[in-house]
Image (cartoon, rainbow, N blue to C red):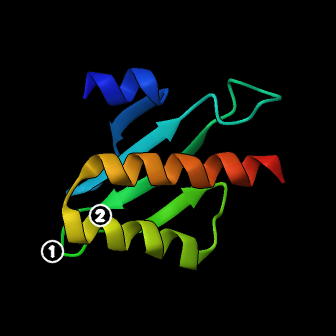
């Protein structure tokens, strides 16, 4: 976990609900390293879901990342994939 938090500039928090985690990235915007991007992961069901994220991403992009996560159950795939989506969203 320390590897992911330090290498991806990631914080993990509770999201105020059982079975929900909030993942917060910094250093995703080249113009403002303090700007945050985050998503909430719902782990209450067999198939994980992302009910909220900011900045808003296209549903199809999120579903592709979730599909890989749900197939592999590898959290690293989720974290890397979502960070890449946020970096791209910040560029536009």
Q: How far across and down, in percent of the image, does residue 35 sit?
A: 69, 32
Mark 1 to mark 2 CA distance (whole Å): 11 Å
**Residue 66 visible here:** yes
The image shows residue 44, relative to residue 91, as above or below, that is below
**Residue 49 visible here:** no
Q: How far across and down, in percent of the image, does residue 80 sit?
A: 44, 46
Q: Residue at x 73, y 35 (%)?
A: 29
Mark 2 surroundings within 10 Å by alpha-carbon count, few (fewer than 14), some (14 through 19), many (20 or more): many
Q: Is residue 92 left or right of residue 25?
A: right
Q: How far across and down, in percent of the image, does residue 36 sit?
A: 62, 36
Q: Is residue 74 left or right of residue 31?
A: left
Q: Which residue matches tag 2?
A: 69
Q: Which residue matches tag 1?
A: 46
Return the disc, 1 or 2, that comes first in the chain's sequence.
Answer: 1
Q: Residue at x 65, y 36 (%)?
A: 28
On-image quarter of the C terminus: bottom right
């Amino acid at each position: 976990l320390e590897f992911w938090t330090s290498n991806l500039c990631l914080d993990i928090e509770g999201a105020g609900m059982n079975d929900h985690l909030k993942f917060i990235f910094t250093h995703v915007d080249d113009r403002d390293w303090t700007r945050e991007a985050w998503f909430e992961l719902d782990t209450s069901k067999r198939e994980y879901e992302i009910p909220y994220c900011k900045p808003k991403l296209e549903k199809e992009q999120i579903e592709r990342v979730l599909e890989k996560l749900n197939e592999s159950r590898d959290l690293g795939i989720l974290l890397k994939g979502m960070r890449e989506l946020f970096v791209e969203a910040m560029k536009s």
